[in-house]
Image: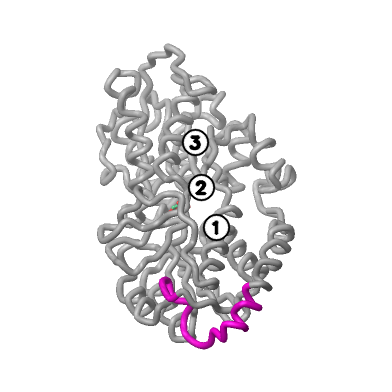
Amino acid sequence: MAKNIWTTRAAVSLAGLSLVGALAACGGSGAGGAGAGGGEEQAPEDMTIGVAMPTQTSERWIADGEAVKSGLEEAGFEVDLQFANDDIPTQQQQIDQMITKGADILVVASIDGTALGNQLKAAADQEIPIIAYDRLINDTENVDHYVTFDNYNVGVQQATSLLQGLGVLDGEGNETGEAGPFNIELFAGSLDDNNAHFFWKGAMETLQPHIDAGTLVVESGQTTIEQAATLRWSQETAQKRMEDLLTAHYGGGSGQLDGVLSPYDGISRGIITALKNAGYGATIEDGLPVVTGQDAEIASVKLINDGVQYATIFKDTRKLAEQAVAAATSYAEGEEPEANDTESYDNGVKVVPSYLLESDIVVKDNIQSLLIDSDYWTAEEVEAGQAG
Ligand code: GAL
């Protein structure tokens, strides 16, 4: 992945921040958190930001962690970055420690969106602003801001790419008149991740009219999110479920399966392994069903380039990291971060002010323009299927 994304931005933000530093010095802002509503300014170099990421098993979260860390450091902050191995007690402990060690602001991508109540209460008691990163934190008033993508639209894009791969929609998203019927199966993400529900809703509201019309058939009948869910977004769990579906409903691989809705590239690769093992063919051209995805992970981008996986959704994690840095900077300045959505993300206790970014559907034909030209991946990385 391109390394120098912060160079230009850093120059801009550092210019801004030296002003903040000067103002903070004049105002004599001393100890104490920046305070979500405190209105006090603090110089970034006097502040530590705790960044809690869920796991290193998925490269997207490693990239997010690195981008947030380098962005915050360029802006002058100290950073305490931790990954939790997809283990909830580990993440709770890491956040406890960040607070004990004096974090001034927290950036949290949760594993389970409802499991951090105690930690966040302790943070709020010390007026530490809490920024939810990519995944909403639910059932607590102690989350101040949310940076993410338009997750409902990600789901719409996933379903759209499935319909395009099957030929029901054209490249512009218009109906082609192709009426199938096509057999499809559905996968969802981890139920404890709020995003999984948004992706599912966006996808199912897009697919349902075609299911109702008989163009799409879910042979297994497994059409609820509970039936389709994949705990912790696990590749192995998805592979196993696909194998079970093939055994139970597709004659172990001899039956016709045309497409699979997958919400994440790791899950897609598990599904593809199961399909290949069952003899569906090595590429889509050879009879492999159309499989969607999300995150533009390099292993999946290679599969798309090789005609194996049909699509993924590109969420530019560099831009998400940039928003997290902007939000932290606002808190350091004693301001509220900018939100562009104050309606969509109700966490059960309050609507969390959010900044939503847009995403794109990636297929073989636009890998170059979306991923390579933007320096997200190099042509060599796409060729090799791994980050260089
Ligand atoms: C979601 C995230 C997706 C994907 C998934 C699995 O919360 O929004 O982009 O990364 O987790 O890690």
Disc on the earlier residue, 3 or 1: 3
Q: Is residue 156 magenta?
A: no
Q: Is residue 92 left or right of residue 85?
A: left
Q: Which residue is mark 3?
A: 276
| Amino acid, disc 1 | Gln
Q: Which residue is mark 1?
A: 323
At horizontal 33% and vertical 32% (from top left) the residue drawn is 205
Circles 3 and 2 in contact, beta carbons < 8 Å? no
Q: Is residue 29 magenta?
A: yes
Q: CA distance from mark 3 to mark 2?
A: 35 Å
Circles 2 and 1 in contact, beta carbons < 8 Å? yes
Q: Residues within 10 Å of mark 2 (few under 14, many from 20)?
A: some
Q: Secondary structure at mark 1?
A: helix
Q: CA distance from mark 2 to mark 1?
A: 9 Å
The segment highlighted magenta reads: 20-38
| Amino acid, disc 3 | Lys
- When the figure is inspected, residue 290 is found, relative to residue 189, above or below; the finding is above
- When the figure is inspected, residue 123 is found, relative to residue 317, above or below; the finding is below
Give the x, y percent position of residue 287: 50, 25
| Amino acid, disc 2 | Leu
Q: Which residue is mark 2?
A: 357
Q: CA distance from mark 3 to mark 1?
A: 40 Å
Judge: label 1 CB < 8 Å from ligand 1: no
- When the figure is inspected, residue 181 is found, relative to residue 84, above or below; the finding is above
- When the figure is inspected, residue 154 is found, relative to residue 230, above or below; the finding is above
At horizontal 38% and vertical 14% (from top left) the residue drawn is 179
Give the x, y percent position of residue 118: 31, 76
Give the x, y percent position of residue 103: 49, 80
In the depicted view, which residue is nearer to us: 40 or 315?
40
Give the x, y percent position of residue 306: 63, 34
Q: Is residue 188 left or right of residue 327?
A: left
